């Protein structure tokens, strides 16, 4: 697959390409937490005074666009390499969260299966008071060699 | 806080092992809450048609399982950072095992670093994780 990684970095890294809003409802917070095995009341009981989302809840938020317009990506060649969540403040029922997306980093590595490109898609989340609440990095791995 | 304090924890301490519920109804509950109700997660047949060994556990559910294990070990703790690498698929309706160990202590920040693994029924590590955790606010 012929991709000019340097050109791709210059064109896409650091530019916001999506902004989406997410309303936080208690039923979803509880179901998400219970399915993961949480038992603490602050995650599964909306009546708890400290009721909040589990820390990786914003990892479930998707913008309207996953990648910038024109970003070359073949689904057959790519896979989800992992996710990182950094939390700064609690996300609570009734919050309205804004997520802003940009490509944070693009780098190459050569592994046992050949050359690969890592695309780090970052969403930065803030609440209705414009306070930062979380960052989620999604590492997308793209195989560059012959398949 | 009812749980551990920073001074109670040493480098090398292991978190209690935890066998998460990755049965299909629980995964469906998760995907409904997360807005990820797709065949590869919710239906064995559809997943097999897509070339998977069966319905699989969403990556971010594995991440949530890591968080649940940390909270069970240290109630009231705050997970500041949680990073996961998805190495292999975890198939629904199988047995998996979640493990964690304390790999570092930061006395200035009073935070702990944990290494986390989620293994599949064959004992292979399907998901790797690291977490930075504060036991006291």
Image (cartoon, rainbow, N blue to C red):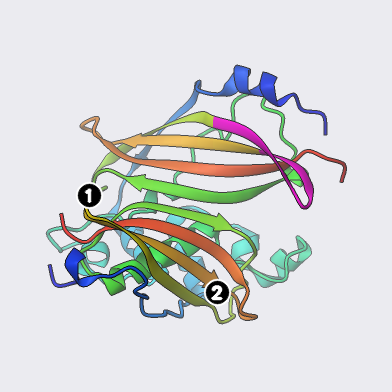
**Residue B31 shows in this picture:** no
Q: Give the magenta-colored segment's residue range.
A: A105-117
Identify the disc placed on residue B24: 2
Residue A133, percent from left and from top: 29, 40
Q: Label 1: chain?
A: B
Q: Which residue is at 18% across, 72% downward? A: B3
Residue B133 falls within the magenta-colored stretch = no
Residue A119, percent from left and from top: 61, 36
Q: Nearer the viewer, mark 1 or mark 2?
A: 1
Q: Which residue is at 33% across, 70% downward? A: A38
Relative to B55, does residue A15 appear above or below in the rendering? above
Q: Quadrant of the C terminus of chain B?
A: bottom left
Q: Which residue is at 20% across, 58% downward? A: A51
**Residue A145 shows in this picture:** yes
Disc 1 packing (10 Å; few <14; some 14–19; many ≥20): few
Q: Residue B71: name its quadrant.
A: bottom left
User: Sequence-wise, which precedes: disc 1 or disc 2?
Assistant: 2
Q: Residue B34: name its quadrant.
A: bottom left
B48 on left or right of B61 = right
Residue A65, percent from left and from top: 55, 32
Q: Residue furthest right?
A: A146
Residue A110 falls within the magenta-colored stretch = yes
Q: Are marks 1 and 2 on the same chain?
A: yes
Q: Label 2: chain?
A: B
Q: Are marks 1 and 2 in contact (CB under 8 Å)?
A: no
Relative to A108, does residue B27 appear above or below in the rendering? below
Q: Quadrant of the N terminus of chain B?
A: bottom left
**Disc 1 designates what residue?**
B109
Identify the disc placed on residue A140: none
């Amino acid at each position: 697959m012929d991709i000019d990684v340097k050109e791709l970095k210059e064109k896409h890294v650091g530019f916001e390409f999506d902004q989406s809003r997410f309303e936080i409802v208690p039923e979803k917070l509880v179901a998400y937490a219970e399915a993961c095995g949480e038992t603490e009341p602050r995650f599964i009981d909306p009546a708890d005074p400290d009721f909040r989302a589990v820390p990786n809840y914003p990892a479930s938020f998707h913008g309207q666009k996953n990648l910038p317009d024109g970003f070359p990506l073949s689904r057959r060649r790519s896979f989800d390499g992992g996710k990182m969540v950094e939390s700064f403040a609690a996300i609570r029922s009734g919050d309205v969260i804004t997520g802003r997306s940009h490509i944070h980093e693009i780098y190459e590595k050569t592994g046992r299966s050949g050359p690969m490109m890592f695309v780090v898609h970052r969403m930065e989340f803030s609440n209705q008071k414009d306070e930062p609440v979380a960052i989620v990095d999604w590492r997308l791995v793209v195989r560059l060699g012959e398949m | 806080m009812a749980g551990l304090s920073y001074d109670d924890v040493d480098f090398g301490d292991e978190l209690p092992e935890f066998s998460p519920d990755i049965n299909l109804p629980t995964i469906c509950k998760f995907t409904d809450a997360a807005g990820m109700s797709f065949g590869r997660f919710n239906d064995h047949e559809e997943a097999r048609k897509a070339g998977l060994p069966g319905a699989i556990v969403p990556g971010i559910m594995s991440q949530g399982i890591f968080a649940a294990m940390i909270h069970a070990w240290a109630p009231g703790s705050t997970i500041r950072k949680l990073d996961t690498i998805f190495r292999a698929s975890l198939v629904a309706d199988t047995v998996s095992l979640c493990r964690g160990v304390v790999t570092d202590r930061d006395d200035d920040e009073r935070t702990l670093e944990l290494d986390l693994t989620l293994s599949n029924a064959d004992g292979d590590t399907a998901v790797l994780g690291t977490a930075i955790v504060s036991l006291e606010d």
